[in-house]
Image (tube, rainbow, N blue to C red):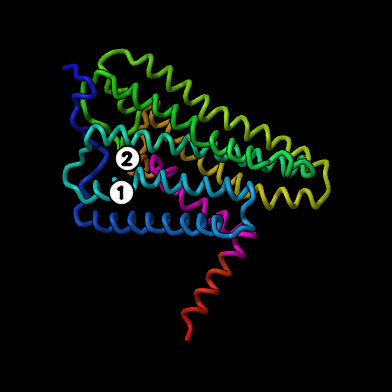
Amino acid sequence: MKLNSSQVLYFTLTAYVDSGSLKYFCFFVILSLYVLIISCNVLLIVLICVNRSLHEPMFLFLCSLFVNELYGSLGLFPFLLVQILSDVHIIPAPLCFLQIFCIYTYASVEFTNLAVMSYDRYVAICCPLQYNSLMTSQRIVFLLFIIWLPPCLAVGGTAFLSSSLQLCGNVINKVYCSNHSIIKLACNDPTANNIYELIMTFFTVCVPVSVIVYTYMRILQVCFSGSKQTRQKAVSTCTPHLASIINFSFGVSFEILQSRFNMNTVPSFIRILLSLYFLTCQPVFNPVLYGLNMSKIRSMCKKLVLNSVRKCSP
C-alpha cells in the first residue's frame, strides 16, 4: 500500500532490544554522558563569552563548535533516554523528520566549522603579519554565517524531499531516524532524493574536507621550510584540531558505509555503538580536547576552579 509520508503517523525503530532491568543501567550511563556534554560545552562557551582575552577569531569559532555540540546532543539524547525506558519504540513522523534535520545539520555544521577553523589556522601560521587585516570582525561574522546557514538550507531541502515521498512501510532498523532509512521505504524510484543527497554531501562534506586538506598541505609546507618556533606553534594549535577532524570523520564514515552497504555481518551491538559514535563521542571529545590543549582555556579553567574553592572555603 502506497502512503505519502504525511499519512504515516509514526515510524517503528527495530534496533532496540529488550534488555530487561539492564535498561536502567543504560539509561543512567546515557544520562550521565548527556550531563557531562552539557556541563563541559556550556562551561567553555561561558568562559569564551565572559573573558575578553578570549575574544579572538579562533576562540569564537571554537565557541560556535561547542554550540553545535549542544545542538547535536539535543537532537539525540533526550530521544534516546525516552526510548530506552519505553516498551514500544515508535516515533511520530513529524518528530522523525525533525530529528533527521537536527542530526544532519549537526554533522554538516561540524564539517564546515572545522573547515573554517583550519582556514583560521592557515592564515595565522602562513600569513601571520596579515592575520589581523584578514580576520576582521566583518569576515568573522561572514564565516559564522557560512558555518551555519548553508548546512541548514541544504538539510532543510533534504528533509522536505523525504517528507514528500510515498512510503510502503514505516519500519526503520536503527535507534534513531536517518534520511537514507526513509528513502529505502519509498515505493517509487527515489532518484531525485538520491541525487539531491549526493549534491548536498558534496557541498557540506566534500567541499569542507577539501578546504581542510588544502590548508593543512600549505601549513605543512610552511612548517618544513620555517623555523623551529613556527613548527612548535603549528603543533600546539593544530594538534587538537586535527584530532577532532580524524575522530569525527571516523564516526561519520562508518555511518555512511552502514547506510549504503549491507553490514549484517557486523554484530548488531557493534553497529549501534558505531552509528552513535559521531553523535555521542564528538560532543565530549571536543571540549575535553580543546580544554586540555589550549593554554588560554586551560588557565581560565584553573582560575575558575581556584576561585570556586576560595569561595567555598571558610
**Span highlighted in magenta in the image:** 274-300
Say left or right for 117 vs 224: left
Q: CA distance from mark 2 to mark 1?
A: 22 Å
Which residue is located at x 34 percent, y 32 percent?
178
Image position, residue 148 (x, y; %):
49, 36
Q: Mark 1: which amino acid? A: Pro
Number of numbered discs on residues: 2
In this orientation, which residue lies closer to the viewer: 16 or 74? Answer: 74
Image position, residue 117 (x, y; %):
61, 42
Q: Which residue is mark 1?
A: 78
Determine whether 60 is above or below 217 in the image: below
Residue lying furthest front: 138
Q: Mark 2: which amino acid? A: Ser
In this orientation, which residue lies closer to the viewer: 274 or 181? Answer: 181
Which residue is located at x 38 percent, y 25 percent?
158
Count neighbours of disc 2 (C-alpha within 10 A) and say few if under 14, some if 14 to 19, many if 20 or more. Answer: some
Q: Are marks 2 and 1 in contact (CB under 8 Å)?
A: no
In this orientation, which residue lies closer to the viewer: 167 or 247? Answer: 167
Q: Quadrant of residue 211?
A: top right
Q: Is residue 12 magenta?
A: no
Q: Dot 2: what SS?
A: helix
Image position, residue 49 (x, y; %):
54, 55
Say left or right for 63 vs 255: right
Image disc number at residue 268: 2
Q: Dot 1: what SS?
A: helix
Image position, residue 264 (x, y; %):
33, 32
Which residue is located at x 48 percent, y 20 percent?
199
